[in-house]
């Protein structure tokens, strides 16, 4: 389907996307079993009734301030800036409670689930940060929580598995399919289908059937609103560019949304380039994918010529997903956001750089954005760039022990 970029951008800025059918231009919608349609309609009605109601927003804002620790800091990375040649600013989602941006969405959806009368929560997780955030939010609100996690991800994100269990969640290993995030989403959906009224599916990224891409964006948009205001206060103007890593795309859409109407601000998303451009060697959906349907939404996917979804690879568990949120697909199609990729080795070197120059251990997901920031800085000397540091890297120590730290022994 062809898209007029000017009209589509105007619709985005005016709030006309998603439309009544849950579409961002040609992307989005609902492609789910018939048994889930009433549940999704009920959720959509709940979103319309509660999400922007003053009472909900007051409760949500209060919890973000007193429990999550918002606003998170905007940090000028002085030594990294001197090394790379441009002003690098970090939006510090790593400082939020549980260590990543995921808590914004998990808390908001858990509050919504309680208002909708849910008796239990199910969630999926890849890197484990959404699982930890969901477990923490459910503990805060007194809701039982079950988290599905691929067995491969459980091995490489073992610290987060322990954290989820300590927070009271039941963690279910997924041994089917690719045993990573895609398979975990499949299992969470199966659970939800079995009890669509009593169970609330707390989806962790800006993917899935309508209204999830919209709901997650609205809950994560606090990142960009804060960053925009904080940078203007610090510098008296807007930055030249903003950047974030992109897997399913929740931290990125949260960061980007406030800046989409600003034509002078370049927006860049960085996907996981993995081992290279060959199918199966990366998770760079917008760089190498084609349109298709996955997990209830029409978007860009990594698939073969027969339309079979392919296994992906990334050193980062949280970016290891063969799809992307439909709003990102539209932003790429109309050219408002430029998407590129960074490979495993670039990401690992960016972890080392931020540790050594700024004393900050970033998540491997965030390190992909930092790799993109280094390239941008080299080509824009003296420019100003705000990077969403989506999470901290404690969870990645098992992987870093086998990669970066192994190289120094």
Image (cartoon, rainbow, N blue to C red):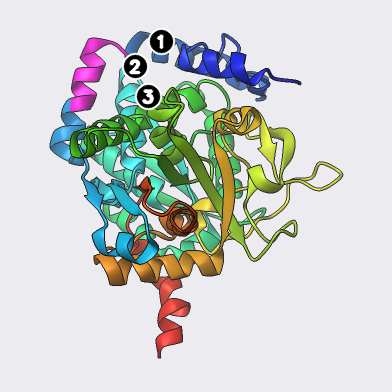
Q: Is residue 133 visible?
A: yes
Residue labelled with disc 1: 48
| Residue projecting furthest to the right | 306
Q: Quadrant of the C terminus?
A: bottom left
Dot label at residue 388 = none
106 lies left or right of 6? left
Dot label at residue 51 = 2
Task: Tell me how far mark 1 sits from mark 3, CA to CA.
Answer: 17 Å
Q: Which residues are magenta?
A: 52-61
Between circles 1 and 3, the one closer to the viewer is 1
Residue labelled with disc 3: 118
Residue found at x 34% / y 22%: 112
- As for residue 58 lying within the magenta part, the answer is yes
Residue found at x 59% / y 36%: 190
Q: Secondary structure at mark 1?
A: helix
Q: Earlier in the sequence, mark 1 or mark 3?
A: 1
């Amino acid at each position: 389907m062809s898209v007029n970029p000017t009209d589509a951008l105007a619709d985005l800025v005016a709030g006309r996307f998603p439309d009544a059918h849950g579409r961002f231009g040609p992307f989005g919608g609902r492609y789910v079993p018939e048994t889930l349609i009433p549940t999704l309609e009920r959720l959509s009605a709940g979103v319309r009734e509660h999400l922007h109601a003053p009472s909900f927003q007051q409760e949500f804002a209060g919890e973000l301030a007193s429990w999550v620790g918002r606003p998170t800091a905007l940090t000028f990375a002085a030594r990294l800036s001197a090394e790379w040649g441009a002003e690098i600013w970090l939006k510090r989602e790593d400082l939020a409670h549980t260590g990543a941006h995921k808590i914004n969405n998990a808390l908001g959806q858990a509050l919504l689930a309680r208002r909708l009368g849910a008796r239990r929560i199910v969630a999926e997780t890849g890197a484990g940060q959404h699982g930890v955030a969901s477990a923490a939010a459910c503990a805060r609100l007194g809701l039982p929580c079950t988290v599905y996690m691929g067995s491969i991800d459980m091995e490489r994100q073992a610290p987060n598995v322990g954290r989820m269990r300590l927070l009271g969640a039941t963690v279910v290993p997924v041994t089917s399919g690719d045993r990573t995030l895609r398979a975990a989403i499949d299992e969470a959906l199966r659970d939800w289908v079995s009890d669509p009224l009593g169970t609330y599916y707390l989806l962790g990224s800006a993917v899935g059937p309508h209204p999830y891409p919209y709901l997650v964006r609205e809950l994560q948009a606090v990142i960009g609103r804060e960053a925009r205001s904080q940078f203007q206060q610090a510098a008296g103007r807007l930055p030249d560019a903003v950047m974030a890593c992109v897997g399913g795309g929740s931290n990125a859409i949260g960061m980007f949304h406030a800046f989409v109407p600003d034509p002078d601000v370049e927006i860049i998303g960085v996907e996981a380039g993995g081992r290279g451009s060959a199918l199966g060697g990366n998770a760079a959906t917008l760089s190498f994918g084609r349109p298709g349907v996955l997990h209830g939404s029409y978007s860009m996917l990594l698939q073969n010529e027969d339309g079979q979804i392919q296994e992906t690879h990334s050193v980062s568990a949280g970016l290891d997903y063969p799809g992307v949120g439909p709003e990102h697909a539209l932003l790429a199609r109309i050219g408002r956001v430029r998407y590129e990729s960074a490979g495993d080795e670039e990401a690992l070197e960016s972890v080392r750089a931020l540790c050594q120059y700024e004393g900050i251990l970033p998540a491997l997901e965030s390190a992909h954005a930092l790799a993109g920031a280094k390239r941008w800085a080299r080509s824009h000397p003296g420019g100003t760039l705000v990077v969403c540091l989506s999470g901290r890297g404690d969870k990645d120590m098992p992987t870093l022990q086998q990669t970066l730290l192994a190289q120094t022994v």
